[in-house]
Image (cartoon, rainbow, N blue to C red):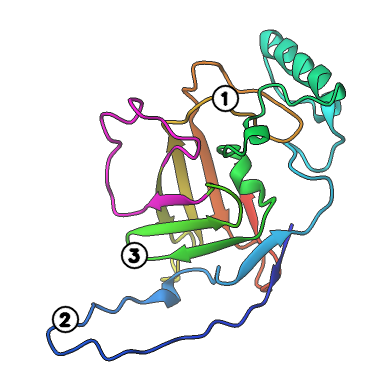
C-alpha cells in the first residue's frame, strides 16, 4: 500500500503569440486520478513479497540454478557487499524494482504516453500507449527500465478507464528483482507484465499487480 502526499502545484500562464496553434484538448476524466506524489506506505524496503521477511523467507519461485545464485547474493550482502546489485554504483536498479517506489514517485498521464517519474538517479519510465509495436532493434541497446508498451482498459464499460496494462521488454542486466538480491536470468530476456490501477475510491491508496 502506498500513501499519497498532497502537494500544491502552481500554474503559470504566458502569452505565446498568435502564430502558436492551440493544442487539442483531451478528456482526462476518462482516466483514474493518479495525480500527486506517491510514497511507500509499508516498512521493509524493496521486496519481492513485502509480507514476508528478507532472504530465503521471500520464497521466490526460482529454479535450483538461480536459487544458488540468490544464496551467493545473500552471502555477499552478509559481508557488507552488494553482489550483482547495480545501485552501489548509482546505476538504476531497473525494472520492476523501480516500481517499488523506494523514492517519491509521480505519474503523469498524456494521451500517447504515461510517464513514471522517480526522485532518484535515472529511474524515470515512459509507457507508450499510442498503439505502437515493439521496435526491431530493442535488444541492440537494452535499458535498465526497458521498453514499455501499455494499454488503458475500461473493464466495467462505464466509459472510464480502470487500469493500465503494461508489458516491458528490452531490459539490461545486471538487475535484481528487489533489494534482497533475487536475480533474473543472465540473458536479460525478461518480460515484465504490470497492471496499474487504483485499489479503492479513496485518494490515499493504490496498487500495482505484477
Task: Give me the disc on residue 21.
Answer: 2
Sequence-wise, the earlier of marks 3 and 1 is 3
Q: Please, is residue 206 above or below residue 77 in the view?
A: below
Please name the predominant secondary structure of the magenta segment in the image: loop
Residue 161 position in % (x across, y down): 45, 65
Residue at 52 percent across and 47 percent down: it is 122
Observer-nearest of 78 and 4: 78
Residue 91 position in % (x across, y down): 58, 37
Q: How far apart are marks 2 and 3 (CA)?
A: 18 Å
- Element type where label 3 sits in the image: loop
Residue at 60 percent across and 45 percent down: it is 98
Question: The C terminus lies in which quarter of the figure?
Answer: top right
Rendering quarter of residue 49 = top right
Q: Give the range drawn in magenta.
A: 124-147
Rendering quarter of residue 75 = top right
Q: Distance between the residues labelled 2 and 1?
A: 45 Å
Q: How crowded is mark 1: few (under 14 residues within 10 Å), some or many (20 or more)?
A: some
138 with respect to 171 (left or right): left
**Total number of numbered labels?**
3
Q: Mark 3 points at which residue?
A: 111
Sequence-wise, the earlier of marks 2 and 1 is 2
- Element type where label 2 sits in the image: loop
Cβ–Cβ under 8 Å for marks 2 and 3: no
Residue at 73 percent across and 42 percent down: it is 46
Q: Single out the residue that lies furthest toward the front.
A: 89
Q: Name the residue under label 1.
A: 174
Give the label, 3 or 1, closer to the camera: 1
Amino acid at each position: 500500500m502506498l500513501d499519497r502526499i498532497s502537494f500544491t502545484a502552481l500554474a503559470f500562464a504566458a502569452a505565446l503569440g498568435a502564430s502558436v496553434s492551440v493544442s487539442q484538448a483531451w478528456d482526462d476524466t476518462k482516466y483514474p486520478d493518479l495525480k500527486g506524489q506517491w510514497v511507500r506506505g509499508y516498512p521493509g524496503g524493496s521486496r519481492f513479497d513485502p509480507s514476508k521477511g528478507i532472504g530465503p523467507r521471500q520464497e521466490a519461485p526460482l529454479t535450483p540454478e538461480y536459487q544458488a545464485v540468490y544464496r551467493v547474493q545473500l552471502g555477499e550482502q552478509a559481508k557488507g557487499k552488494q553482489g550483482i546489485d547495480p545501485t552501489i554504483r548509482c546505476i538504476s536498479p531497473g525494472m520492476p524494482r523501480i516500481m517499488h517506489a523506494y523514492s517519491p514517485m509521480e505519474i503523469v498521464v498524456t494521451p500517447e504516453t504515461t510517464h513514471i517519474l522517480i526522485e532518484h538517479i535515472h529511474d524515470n519510465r515512459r509507457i507508450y500507449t499510442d498503439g505502437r509495436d515493439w521496435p526491431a532493434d530493442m535488444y541492440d541497446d537494452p535499458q535498465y527500465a526497458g521498453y514499455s508498451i501499455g494499454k488503458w482498459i475500461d473493464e466495467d464499460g462505464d466509459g472510464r478507464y480502470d487500469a493500465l496494462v503494461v508489458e516491458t521488454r528490452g531490459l539490461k542486466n545486471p538487475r535484481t528483482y528487489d533489494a534482497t538480491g533475487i536475480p533474473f536470468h543472465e540473458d536479460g530476456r525478461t518480460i515484465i507484465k504490470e497492471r496499474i490501477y487504483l485499489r479503492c475510491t479513496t485518494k490515499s491508496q493504490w496498487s500495482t499487480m505484477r
